[in-house]
Image (cartoon, helix red, strand yellow):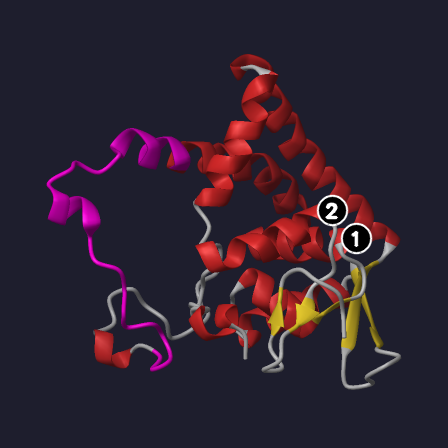
Amino acid sequence: MTQAARTRPAPIPDAANEDLPEVGYSPDKPAQDLPRDLPQDLPADESRDSGEAPAYDLIELLFFAYRDFVADPDRILAEYGFGRAHHRVLHFVDRHPGLTIAELLDILRITKQSLNRVLKELIEQGYIAQRTGTSDRRHRLLTCTPEGRSLAQRLAGVQGQRVRRALAEAGPALRGPASRFLLAMIEPQEREAVSRLIAGGEPATDASGGARPGGARP
């Protein structure tokens, strides 16, 4: 098992499914009622211990930027009766045709139950197709249908427009620093894999049998 696999947090029930929370999950549940595999060794509040105030400006800018960044595709998704979980599945399957369910689960960090619900709807409505793997028939490989690719590209298009507009206002020279800042927000052990995935590298399976973003398929 790789170091990344050992330190990877367990999926949170509705981490990528905020438009439809997982049945039976509530943020008000007592801690003892939450899934036992959730990480218990959360990092200490360093800002409180050091006496530094939280970076409220950046925290709130990230909140408002994300709010508006997802609002653009939300309006399109509403035309189809889809939510943000459908968008994320379409996006990564379109970007990486032949993605397996295990790889997609690892990218999105959601429960299998949540993914199965979303996939079922996308497959039944003709946006995602699945086929049996050639080297391992236990794998189901996911691809976008022409309709799915068209929708994924339409969603990426409106988000791309917002990013281009922001870079034009802030200055194109800030693209590099912005990319480095966002990468630094990701857990250190995940950054290399995420960078490979963004660059077009295919998700791979680690030695423990779990999928991780980046690298070559076995």
Q: Position of residue 161 (x, y in %)?
A: 66, 26
Q: Nearer the viewer, residue 191 or 24?
A: 191
Residue in the image at 67% along x and 48% along y: 198
Say above or below: 86 vs 168.
below
Q: CA distance from mark 2 to mark 1?
A: 6 Å
Residue in the image at 42% along x and 67% along y: 12
Q: Position of residue 181 (x, y in %)?
A: 46, 36
Read off the magenta span.
35-62
Residue in the image at 89% along x and 79% along y: 134
Q: Are marks 2 and 1 in contact (CB under 8 Å)?
A: yes
Q: Nearer the viewer, residue 35 or 122?
A: 35
For residue 185, side relative to residue 103 (left or right):
left
The total of numbered circles placed on residues is 2
Observer able to see residue 83 = no
* Residue type (three-letter) at the residue carrying disc 2: Ala
For residue 196, side relative to residue 66 (left or right):
right
Magenta-span inclusion, residue 9:
no
Say above or below: 124 vs 69.
below
Say above or below: 115 vs 1.
above
Query: SS class of the residue under badge 1?
Result: helix
* Residue type (three-letter) at the residue carrying disc 1: Gly
Name the quarter where the C terminus is drawn. Answer: bottom right
Residue in the image at 69% along x and 64% along y: 203
Say above or below: 52 vs 201.
above
**Residue 145 placement: quadrant:** bottom right
> For mark 2, what is the residue?
152
**Residue 59 placement: quadrant:** top left
For residue 157, side relative to residue 18 (left or right):
right
Name the quarter where the N terminus is drawn. Answer: bottom right
Q: Residues within 10 Å of mark 2 (few under 14, many from 20)?
A: many
